[in-house]
Amino acid sequence: MKQILNPFKTWASLLCLMALTGIQAFASSHREAPLIANDPLADNTDLYAFRSPDDPNTITIIANYIPAQLPFGGPNYYTFGENIRYEIHIDNDYSVPGDEIIYRFTFHRENEGLSTFFNIRLGAQNLKTTYTMERSMDGGATFDLLIMDGIVPPPNIGPRSIESAVGLNTDYESLISQAIMMSSGGERVYCGPADDPFFVDLGGIFDLGNAPRQNGPSRDGLAQYNVHSIAIQVPISTLLKAGAAAQPANILDSDYVIGIWASASRRAVRTIVDGSLAPEESGDWVQVSRLGMPLTNEAVIPIGMKDYWNSLTPYEELSDTLLDKYFYNPELALYMDDDLYGGAVPAFAALRIQRNSLQAFDFGNGHDGLYGLKGSAAVAGTALDDAVFGALLLPGPGLPRSVDLWPIFHTGVPNFPPYQLATGKNGNPLAAGKPFINNFLPNGGDMLRLNMAVPVTSRNDPQFSALGIVQAAVLGLTDPAYNSSADLQFIPNMDGFPNGRRLEDDVTRIELQAVAGIALAAVGLWYDDYTAGDANPLTQDLLDVLTYSTGVEANDALFKDSFPYLASPWRGTKAGEPN
C-alpha cells in the first residue's frame, strides 16, 4: 500500500486556510514559517556575502541551513538532507531577468557501521555525508560538475568520538581543514557543521518585543547552537557580469553589484511504500525555503503569508504586489509611534519614526511620506522622478516607507540623489550629497545585494563596526576626515550590511534602526526634534536611535581569520557550560 504526499498541494491548501496575525519571529530565518518549521533539513537560516578580508579578490558566500541544532543531539545528529537541492543564486546583470549563476549542492548519506548505535566508532561513521557541487553559468539551463564526493565533517560529538583511538583518532580542526576543498571552477568550498553565527535575544524578542529586556539581562538565544553551512569563496572575476571591466571604475561601480539569494527545493511527490525503509521521491522540484535579506520573512511578512513568501523567487516577488504593503507600512513601525502603539513596547522607546521631519513630512504608517512631492520640481532629476526610475519609489499616497524600506529590500540603493549622505546637501535632503552606498539591482525582489568594488574594512581596524552602513553614515556625517567634502571616499564599514552582510554585522539592531527611520535621517530627513535650518541635526531623537541596542551585540564564539571564517561547531560534551 502506498501513501502519496504532494507537498505543493499541501502548501496551497494550507495557505488558503491561514488567517493568523501577530508579532513576527526574529531569528533571521530559523523556523520562520509554519510549513518549513516541520522540515528543518530544508530550512534556510541565514545568508552572508562579503568581500573576503584576507583575500579581497574573492567574495565569500555562506548559506546556512537546519536551525537550532543541539550539539548533544544524539543518537540521530543533524546533517544535510538527501533528496534536497540546496542552491545559491547570483544575479549580476539587471538588464537580464533572472539568475546568471547558480551553485547547486546535493548530499548523500551512508552508514558505515550498521552494528552500532553510536554515530562514530572505530574509525567508522554513521550518517557519513558527502556532496556533489554543480555550477550553472547560464541561469540554470546547463550545469557543470565541480566537486564529486565532497567531504562533510561529522558532528563534533566529543573527545572519545573524535580524538580517541576508539573514535576517529584525529582532532576536529583537522576534520574542518580536510573538508575545505578547491573546486575545478576555482571556488574554495566548505560544507559542514558550524556554530550558528546569528546572534539575537530570541526570548526577549518573542516576548512581545522585549529587547533589550526591561527586567533582567538579555541573552543570546542561539548561543551554543549549531547549523550546517555551505560556504563558497568565489573569485570576483567569476561573479562579474559579462562585459564588465576587470577593475572597477571606482569603489561604487554599478557593474560590480550582485544579488545573492539561497533556496532549498524538494520533489513534488513523496511516496511512502509499505515495507520500505525510505520514501520514494518523484516529480518536479518545488522551492520550499528561500532567503536573501535577513529577517524579511520574520519581521516584515505576517504569519499568514510566510509560506507563500517562501514559495516565490525574488523575481516573482518583485512583480507580485500582494506583499509590498508590508514594506510600505511595516507592523514594527506601529510600536515606534507614540500616536499608535509605541507605549505597548517599552523596549523600543528609543526608536521613534519621523512624524514631522523638517516640519513637513510624516512617515508614520498610513501617511504620505514624500508622496506629496510627486511630479514636482523638487524631485525632478532625482530617483523619485518618474522619468528616472518610474513609479517604483512613490507609487501612491499612504505608503510612506516606499522611499526607504521598500528599496532597501527590493532593489538595493542607488548612488543617486536623494540616496546620498546629508553631507554637502546644505539642508536640502533631495540634493546631491556624499556617496556612501550603491548596490542598486532593480530586476529582482528580496536579495542580499553586494557591491564587490567596495574595499574591505579590516576586522582589526579600530573603526570596524557591527553597525555596517549605519556606522559608515555616522562617520560620513560627523568625522572631519569624511564630512569636510561631498566627494566619493571609502568610509570604513561601507562593506557592511545592507551592502552585503558580514558575519559580525548586528543585523537585528540595524534593521530595527532602519524601521525607526535611520536611513531617512542619513540623507537629511531628520527627526522631529530638529528644526529645519538649525546648524546641528544631532538631536536627542537621533542619538537615541543610534545608541539603541537589543542587548545582544556579538556572537557567542569568535569568528576565524580565514575561510570559512565561521566558528567551529559546539561540542556535544561542552554544550551548556559557560563560554
Image: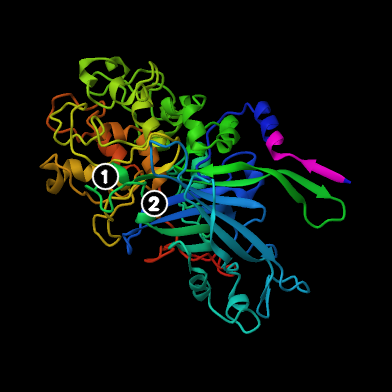
Q: Is residue 462 above or below residue 207?
A: below
Q: Which residue is mark 1?
A: 253
Instruction: Residue 106: say if magenta.
Output: no
Q: Is residue 251 above or below residue 10?
A: below
Residue 75 placement: quadrant: bottom right
- Of 235 and 451, nearer the camera is 235
Count neighbours of disc 1 (C-alpha within 10 A) and say few if under 14, some if 14 to 19, many if 20 or more: some
Q: Does label 2 or label 1 sit earlier along the sequence?
A: 2
Q: CA distance from mark 2 to mark 1?
A: 14 Å
User: Tag 1: residue type?
Assistant: Asp
Residue 503 position in % (x across, y down):
40, 55
**Tag 2 secondary structure:** helix
Q: Is residue 217 visible?
A: no
- Of 370 and 143, nearer the camera is 143
Residue 441 left/right relative to 319: left
Which contiguous range is marked in magenta?
2-10
Residue 458 left/right relative to 121: left
- Of 46 and 444, nearer the camera is 444
User: Tag 2: residue type?
Assistant: Leu
Q: Which residue is mark 2?
A: 239
Residue 356 left/right relative to 75: left
Instruction: Residue 4: say if magenta.
Output: yes
Q: Residue at x 57, y 51 (%)?
A: 86
